[in-house]
Image (cartoon, rainbow, N blue to C red):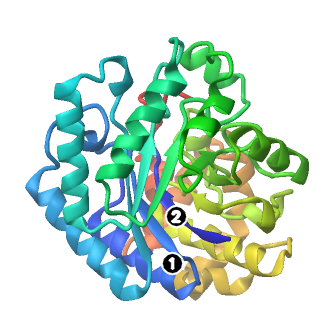
């Protein structure tokens, strides 16, 4: 089973230096891919008809080459917002042009994402399958991954995006080429465990092993933005390798702190062991900041900002700000100050 990162969260996206740094980290830790899909990039979402801006396209091309040199697959997430509502000749031309631009960038993975869109309409599966087939014909990517509008059994999705059409997922499974993977977040949008029973049932419905989009550490929602998740192995997280096509971890808005959790994920995947995050996962923090962070880890992850009193909050800000040159401490200080506030664009808040 392949594993990697999908930068697929709402809120402040990572910067280009942070993305290159993350690619280096992923390569060192034995991950296989990095997918660029920030919700903040309008040219890949609501403004998908417009070309990717030249500066962004140049940065993406360089990032693709950087990943290639590191032995990583580089992917891009394309969310042509509700194109299925009026997929006429003009929309098709715009979509083909966007796929051609992604081909030029050098993406080896292309994710076709229909999440965060209304889905309560007849023939949704047939329309989306047609669009996926067109994109597959135009794309030069070696792997395509499709995200349905209803990517979990979580009732939250129907509350936000409308009632799921009858037979939607089975029909998609029947119509879409079996070589194309399906993203799936588990029993709920933010799952902390994937059981054999659940994955087997999903595979029967979509006619292929699900490709897990893991939101276990994501912190872009109204409640989760008040927490930092660096110990995925502290709870019940597990994933039967033979029942999933792959694992795409959607990290936190904080790239450096995410690397701590990603280190723990790697150990879970390789060894299947749970427990406290291993010491080496904090090595890049530096000795002093690592000691501070280990002491405050449970506070940040469980109590969160709402559980820190005003006096304690001021003390923590002062303590971590004193190490502002340290990127890990800088992210914590920023989070404590409210720099990573909830983005109301997160529809599944």
Q: Residue at x 76, y 47 (%)?
A: 203
Q: Is residue 101 above or below residue 279?
A: above
Does residue 326 appear anywhere in the picture?
no
Residue at mark 2 = 5
Q: Residue at x 51, y 45 (%)?
A: 146
* Quadrant of the rendering where the C terminus is positioned: top right
- Disc 2 and disc 1: Cα gap in Å? 8 Å
Give the number of the disc on residue 26. Answer: 1
Q: Nearer the viewer, residue 206 or 331?
A: 206
Assign the N terminus to one quadrant of the image: bottom right
> In the image, is residue 148 above or below residue 119?
below
The image shows residue 29 at horizontal and vertical percentages of 58, 84
Q: Are marks 2 and 1 in contact (CB under 8 Å)?
A: yes
- The furthest residue to the left: 54
- Horizontal side, residue 334 vs residue 201: left or right: left
Q: Secondary structure at mark 1?
A: helix
Q: Residues within 10 Å of mark 2 (few under 14, many from 20)?
A: many
Disc on the earlier residue, 2 or 1? 2
Residue sitting at x 35%, y 81%: 68
* In front of the other: 132 or 184: 132
Tell me the SS state at disc 2: strand
Q: Quadrant for residue 201, please give it.
A: top right
Q: Is the residue 160 above or below the residue 245 in the image?
A: above
Rendered location of residue 168, percent (x, y): 63, 25
Residue 257 visible at all: yes
| Residue 59 x, y percent position in the rendering | 20, 66
- Above or below, 25 relative to 308: below
Disc 1 packing (10 Å; few <14; some 14–19; many ≥20): many
User: Which numbered marker is on residue 176?
Assistant: none
Question: Percent from the top left, x then y, of residue 145?
Answer: 50, 52
Q: Nearer the viewer, residue 181 or 65?
A: 181
């Amino acid at each position: 089973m392949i594993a990697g990162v999908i930068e697929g969260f709402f809120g402040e996206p990572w910067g280009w230096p942070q993305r290159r740094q993350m690619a280096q980290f992923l390569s060192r830790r034995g991950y296989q891919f990095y997918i660029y899909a920030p919700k903040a990039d309008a040219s890949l979402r609501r403004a998908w008809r417009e070309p990717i801006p030249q500066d962004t396209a140049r940065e993406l091309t360089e990032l693709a080459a950087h990943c290639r040199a590191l032995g990583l697959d580089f992917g891009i997430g394309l969310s042509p917002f509700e194109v299925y509502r009026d997929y006429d000749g003009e929309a098709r031309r715009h979509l083909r042009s966007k796929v051609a631009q992604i081909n030029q960038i050098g993406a080896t993975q292309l994710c076709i994402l229909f999440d965060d869109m209304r889905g309560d309409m007849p023939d949704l599966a047939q329309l989306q399958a047609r669009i996926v087939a067109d994109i597959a014909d135009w794309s030069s990517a070696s792997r395509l991954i499709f995200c349905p509008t209803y990517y979990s059994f979580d009732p939250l999705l129907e509350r936000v995006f409308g009632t799921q059409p009858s037979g939607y997922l089975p029909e998609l499974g029947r119509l879409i080429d079996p070589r194309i993977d399906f993203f799936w977040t588990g029993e709920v949008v933010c799952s902390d465990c994937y059981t054999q029973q659940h994955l087997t049932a999903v595979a029967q419905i979509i006619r292929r092993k699900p490709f897990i989009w893991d939101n276990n550490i994501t912190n872009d929602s109204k409640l989760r933005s008040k927490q930092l998740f660096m110990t995925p192995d502290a709870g019940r997280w597990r994933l039967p390798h033979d029942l999933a096509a792959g694992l795409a971890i959607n990290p936190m808005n904080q790239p450096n702190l995410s690397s701590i959790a990603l280190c723990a994920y790697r150990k879970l995947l390789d060894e299947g062991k749970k427990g406290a995050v291993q010491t080496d996962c904090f090595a890049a923090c530096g000795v002093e900041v690592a000691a501070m962070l280990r002491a405050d880890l449970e506070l940040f992850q469980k109590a969160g900002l709402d559980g820190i009193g005003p006096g304690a909050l001021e003390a923590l800000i002062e303590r971590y700000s004193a190490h502002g040159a340290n990127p890990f401490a800088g992210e914590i200080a920023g989070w404590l100050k409210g720099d990573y506030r909830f983005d109301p664009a997160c529809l599944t808040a």
